[in-house]
Amino acid sequence: MDNTPPHSWEDASIRHFAMLTMLEIDPSNMAGRPSGNDSEKAVFADIVSKLNLIPGCSILDVGSGCGPLTELLCNYAEHREMSLTLFDQTVVNERLVANYPHLVNKAKFVNGVFPNDKIELETRKFDRILLYGVLHYFSNPKSILLDLIDFLNPGGSMLVGDLPNFDKKERLLNSQFGKRLNSEFQQQNNLKDLGLEFNGEIPKIRDQLVLDILETLRSLNFNAYVLPQNNNLPFAFSREDLLIERLPD
Ligand SMILES: C[S@@+](CC[C@H](N)C(=O)[O-])C[C@H]1O[C@@H](n2cnc3c(N)ncnc32)[C@H](O)[C@@H]1O
């Protein structure tokens, strides 16, 4: 593996997730969520309802990962004749197939780093795009979303899930409820600190950025909304989702 220090937040994140594929780590922990299928199933149910995954639709999952959420999505898509494209770096896609060999024919795998390798998607468009737990690994999240909306079919929608909004977390921790929740979380936490190393400044998702994204997308004639997460999701009180819709032609 390359030992030079990462130049950018993107490089640091990509390398971090590549390194995790070489370790024996619970796949949910790898994605930053607690172990256990119950929470992965709750996250998946939330995605299905927000993204309105109807039979026959085409789906692109960017930063798809190699854990249970991807397995749930592959199985769901297969039973409803949806075409599923998984876009992630090569080692992550390889680890997914190593973890779940039965998935090999259930999706089209595109190996690459977005947006550098977006050409690998050719001129394809999709009815649904999923970016779950990934946007905060880019230093310019808005430009990534502007790139991604080009891949949406008319009438299509994109879910940008699990945004760790720093301001939302601060509001939570300022409340008595949040302080209690945080102390319970610290006691029960089964998440390992997987140590993402980066010497530069780590960009934060904040209210201002979220509102700026909504305003920009709306000015481009997309519908864009902030959605809360169901309370049974692991970080429901500090995270939120964005739903973006391209109007039909
Ligand atoms: C926190 S994991 C989330 C995985 C999955 N979406 C989930 O929620 O279970 C982040 C994933 O995004 C991928 N990723 C990060 N930056 C990426 C980029 N620029 N292009 C493609 N994949 C990327 C990583 O390789 C990693 O697999």
Image: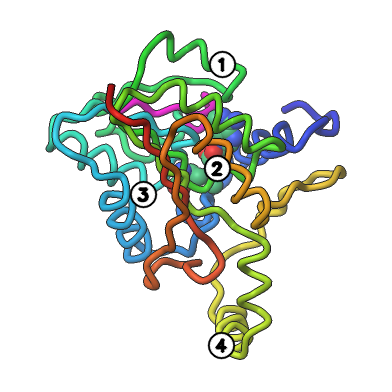
Residue 145 location, x and y as percent?
54, 33
Circle 3: element type? helix
Residue type (three-letter) at the residue carrying disc 4: Phe
Using the numbered discs, state the Cα–Cα distance from disc 1 to disc 4 in whole angstroms: 44 Å
Using the numbered discs, state the Cα–Cα distance from disc 2 to disc 4 in whole angstroms: 28 Å
Please, is residue 113 above or below residue 134 in the view? above
The residue wearing badge 2 is 134
Circle 1: element type? loop
> Which comes before the other along the chain, label 3 or label 1?
3
The residue wearing badge 1 is 117
Residue 246 location, x and y as percent?
37, 31
Of 137 and 94, nearer the camera is 137
Circle 4: element type? helix
The reply to whether discs 2 and 4 touch (Cβ–Cβ < 8 Å) is no
Q: Which residues are magenta?
A: 84-92
Whether the residue carrying mark 1 lies under 8 Å from ligand 1 is answered with yes
Q: Nearer the viewer, mark 3 or mark 1?
A: 1
Q: Nearer the viewer, mark 3 or mark 4?
A: 4
Whether the residue carrying mark 2 lies under 8 Å from ligand 1 is answered with yes
Camera sees residue 143: yes
Q: Nearer the viewer, mark 3 or mark 2?
A: 2
* Left or right of residue 227: residue 114: right
> Which comes before the other along the chain, label 1 or label 2?
1
> Which comes before the other along the chain, label 3 or label 2?
3
Camera sees residue 98: no
The residue wearing badge 4 is 177
> Which comes before the other along the chain, label 3 or label 4?
3
Q: Nearer the viewer, mark 2 or mark 4?
A: 4
Tell me the quadrant of the picture where the N terminus can be found. top right
